[in-house]
Image (spheres, rainbow, N blue to C red):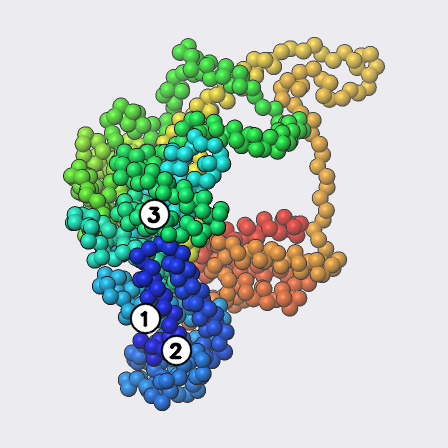
């Protein structure tokens, strides 16, 4: 630990003392203490951000490894005579001063050699992390509880390592990833309000909604007791569950509120019934005590809310302990009476706006050239194709090109096969059946994926953070997909996918993937990512995967496991689709369209008499007056207006520069632009400039645009084309860089066309 960290301004000391005092209640003093502590830490960070650059570098040097060869010094140590001085206030050493570490003795300049080209933004980010590390260190020293101190020590080491490596802090381990339980406390409380008070008048319902928000706000700012202080937990399972949830709360909710270098989550969003049930009795008593002691000191509008709080807490208590309560159901829906009541309120409250929208819809329909089919016509077509005497009935039931999962769906309907999501758990017991299925799935994966070590397969299949969608036939698993969901990042990683060899070519693989897609969309996940080997690429392509990754790299980098020799593939899910029914719906739509075409053909297949007007001396007639023409679908077409020629460069140089600036900004912000944002580093790619004689990048183009280099659009287009040409020249087509170049080039052309500067 650096000397400077021992001379802190007392932020954490005061914060921790006050927080501990406030942990026995939830009054306004606790919330004020928390907010004051956060504000003091932010003020200190602002003071550090405003230091001169030399003092900032000195501060960073205390947490930076010495850059001298074979030196193991992990941070510059202040000389003995200056130990009482503070770098943040009155001390700025000379860069030639030596480190007082006897095993180092190198100059301050040697410790900051690697920070020469760091930007102010990056420097402030590192300095903010240093302040967080120092606060964590002081909290760790003052903490009496052993379990809490271990968590502080873990987070301190994590942030310390992130500062050394200049990387973002990512918490990995057996704690799992938020959210930890569904539905969340916030969702359950919302369900409770609708379930219990949905029948009330809207003013009373709004009042109870405010009470619920107050309860959730208190819960999000509550300081929970350490496991060692919970004498009421006598069941060993309850003790274990509370210890896990308490650690999760510290790591993801409590500490990040004071350390902005860690990602912060709200307690009510990431935790569910298990935590609320464990702490509710204590929170309930403290909040009731708050209502009695502070009611008279509250303003009138808050006083009415406190009057409702005891009744709300008592009613919620019954639902928390009730194992059959509907508020904890994933499929909770308000009663029909409540839906009608809400609809009536919305209708009464916005009659005028609704009338206006209705008028807009009518005008749109009147102005539209599209002719929509009536419900009666579609119903007639449906009735026709469902008729047992329908000529194409055989094609509907047994189509010549049946979907790959048709046979598997038929087996599932006959209950010959089943699909179950199974997984291991640290917080609740796992059934014997689930464990037997996991063992069977392990055998399937090990047999079908011989290139994967059995120990690695065991590690992931039985890891609580991973789940497996199991295909069960005759009571045993014959296939499955092992996956891990990163809810905070919005994607699921598919790790293993296999069907036993004797059951392949039956559509099981496609039906498995469709079930997983439905499982994911129901939980708000819209992206799949996986590394596929050369034998699996074809399968994943058939399931809608592509090598064109549409997710920004920073979303999945550091989360998904990378496999050497495999190809990263991506699949984007549509939340409105039910994938297990998709092929059937498409086939049914196709039959309806064919029947509608047949019906229309029967209507329009009429023989009209020939035109006799020309014999009577008429030289020409409007085309729309020809009998039968409109009936076959003809509509008058309007000639499109000629578009203007692309903007001439010499006409208005400032206008051209503004247009190019907008295009360049859009290209820089595209998710595929990350390889081209700055020049290629020769230290990282030594032979790059041996092959590329005329390099170009988006940073150089930005500087050229500022210097008014692009007097014509042709110069701008040439530089942009050079970026993509260089990339494709140096990289092979299967690389991610090559794909990024293709994607970004298409996007650039689209943006140029939008402003009329593309005429190729």
What crowding class fits label 3: few (fewer than 14 Cα within 10 Å), some (14-19), or many (20 or more)? some
The answer to whether residue 39 of the structure is visible from this angle is: yes
Instruction: Looking at the image, tell me whether mark 3 or mark 2 is earlier in sequence order.
Output: 2
Q: Is residue 469 visible?
A: no
Q: Is mark 1 on a helix, strand or loop?
A: helix
Return the residue nearer the eye: 223 or 76: 223
Residue at coordinates 42% horizontally, 15% vertically from top-left? Answer: 386
Evaluate if marks 1 and 2 touch, with contact meaning CB atoms under 8 Å apart: no
Residue 345, x across and y down, in percent: 52, 31
Task: Report x, y in % for residue 359.
Answer: 65, 29
The percent coordinates of residue 546 (x first, y second) are 41, 45
Q: Name the residue under label 2.
A: 61
Sooner in the amino-acid sequence: mark 1 or mark 2 = 2
- Proximity of marks 3 and 2: CB atoms separated by less than 8 Å: no
Q: Eyeballing the image, is 2 above or below 740? A: below
* Residue 288 disc label: 3
**At 71% across and 53% down in the image, what residue appears?**
647
Identify the residue under disc 1: 138
Q: Which of marks 3 and 1 is nearer the N terminus?
A: 1
Q: How far apart are marks 3 and 2 (CA)?
A: 51 Å
Q: Between tags 1 and 2, which lies in front?
A: 1
């Amino acid at each position: 630990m650096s000397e400077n960290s021992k001379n802190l301004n007392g932020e954490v000391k005061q914060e921790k003392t006050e927080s501990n005092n406030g942990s026995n209640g939830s009054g306004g003093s606790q919330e004020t203490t928390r907010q004051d502590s956060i504000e003091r830490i932010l003020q200190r960070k602002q003071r550090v951000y405003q230091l001169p650059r030399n003092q900032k570098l000195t501060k960073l040097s205390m947490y930076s490894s010495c850059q001298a060869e074979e030196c193991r010094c992990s941070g510059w140590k202040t000389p003995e005579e200056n130990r009482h001085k503070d770098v943040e206030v009155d001390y700025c050493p000379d860069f030639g001063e030596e480190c007082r570490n006897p095993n180092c003795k190198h100059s301050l300049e040697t410790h900051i050699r690697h920070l020469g080209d760091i930007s102010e933004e990056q420097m402030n980010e590192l300095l903010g992390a240093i302040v967080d590390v120092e606060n964590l260190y002081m909290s760790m020293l003052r903490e009496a509880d052993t379990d809490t101190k271990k968590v502080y020590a873990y987070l301190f080491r994590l942030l310390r390592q992130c500062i050394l490596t200049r990387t973002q802090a990512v918490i990995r381990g057996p704690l799992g990833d938020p959210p930890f339980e569904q539905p969340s406390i916030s969702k359950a409380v919302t369900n409770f309000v609708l379930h219990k008070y949905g029948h009330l008048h809207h003013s009373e319902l709004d009042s109870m909604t405010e009470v619920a928000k107050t309860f959730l706000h208190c819960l999000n700012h509550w300081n929970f007791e350490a496991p060692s202080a919970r004498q009421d937990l006598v069941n060993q399972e309850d003790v274990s569950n509370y210890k896990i949830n308490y650690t999760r709360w510290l790591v993801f909710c409590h500490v990040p509120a004071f350390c902005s270098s860690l990602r912060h989550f709200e307690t009510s969003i990431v935790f569910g019934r298990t935590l609320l049930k464990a702490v509710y009795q204590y929170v309930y008593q403290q909040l009731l005590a708050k209502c009695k002691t502070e009611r008279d000191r509250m303003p009138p509008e808050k006083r009415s809310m406190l009057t409702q709080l005891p009744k709300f807490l008592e009613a919620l208590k019954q639902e928390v302990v009730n194992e059959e309560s509907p508020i904890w159901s994933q499929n909770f829906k308000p009663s029909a009476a409540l839906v009608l009541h809400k609809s009536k309120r919305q209708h009464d409250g916005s009659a005028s706006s609704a009338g206006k929208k209705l008028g807009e819809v009518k005008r749109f329909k009147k102005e539209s050239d599209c002719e929509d089919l009536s419900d009666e016509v579609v119903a007639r077509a449906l009735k026709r194709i469902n008729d047992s005497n329908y000529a194409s009935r055989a094609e509907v039931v047994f189509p010549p090109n049946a979907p790959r999962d048709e046979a598997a769906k038929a087996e599932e309907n006959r209950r010959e096969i089943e699909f179950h999501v199974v997984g291991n758990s640290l917080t609740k017991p796992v059934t014997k059946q689930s464990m037997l299925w996991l063992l069977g799935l392990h055998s399937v994966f090990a047999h079908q994926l011989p290139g994967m070590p059995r120990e690695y397969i065991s590690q992931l299949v039985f890891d609580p953070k991973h789940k497996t969608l199991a295909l069960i036939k005759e009571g045993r698993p014959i296939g499955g997909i092992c996956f891990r969901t990163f809810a905070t990042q919005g994607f699921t990683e598919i790790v293993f996918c296999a069907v036993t060899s004797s059951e392949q070519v039956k559509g099981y693989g496609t039906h498995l993937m469709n079930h997983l897609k439905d499982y994911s969309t129901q939980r708000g996940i819209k992206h799949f990512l996986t590394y596929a080997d050369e034998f699996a690429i074809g399968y994943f392509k058939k399931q809608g995967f592509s090598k064109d990754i549409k997710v920004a790299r920073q979303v999945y980098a550091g989360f998904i496991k990378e496999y050497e020799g495999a190809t990263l593939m991506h699949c984007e899910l549509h939340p409105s689709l039910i994938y297990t029914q998709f092929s059937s719906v498409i086939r049914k739509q196709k039959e309806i369209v064919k029947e509608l075409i047949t019906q229309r053909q029967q209507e329009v297949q009429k023989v009209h008499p020939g035109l006799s007007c020309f014999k009577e001396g008429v030289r020409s007639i409007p085309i729309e007056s020809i009998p039968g023409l409109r009936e076959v679908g003809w509509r008058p077409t309007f000639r499109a207006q000629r578009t203007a020629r692309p903007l001439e460069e010499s006409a208005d140089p400032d206008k051209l520069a503004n247009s190019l600036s907008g295009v360049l900004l859009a290209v820089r912000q595209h998710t595929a632009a990350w390889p081209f944002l700055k020049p290629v580093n020769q230290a990282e790619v030594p032979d790059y400039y041996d092959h590329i004689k005329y390099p170009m990048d988006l940073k150089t183009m930005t500087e050229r645009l500022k210097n008014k280099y692009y007097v014509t659009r042709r110069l701008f287009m040439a530089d942009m084309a050079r970026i993509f040409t260089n990339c494709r020249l140096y990289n092979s087509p299967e690389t991610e860089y090559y794909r990024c170049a293709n994607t970004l080039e298409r996007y650039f052309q689209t943006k140029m066309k939008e402003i009329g500067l593309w005429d190729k």
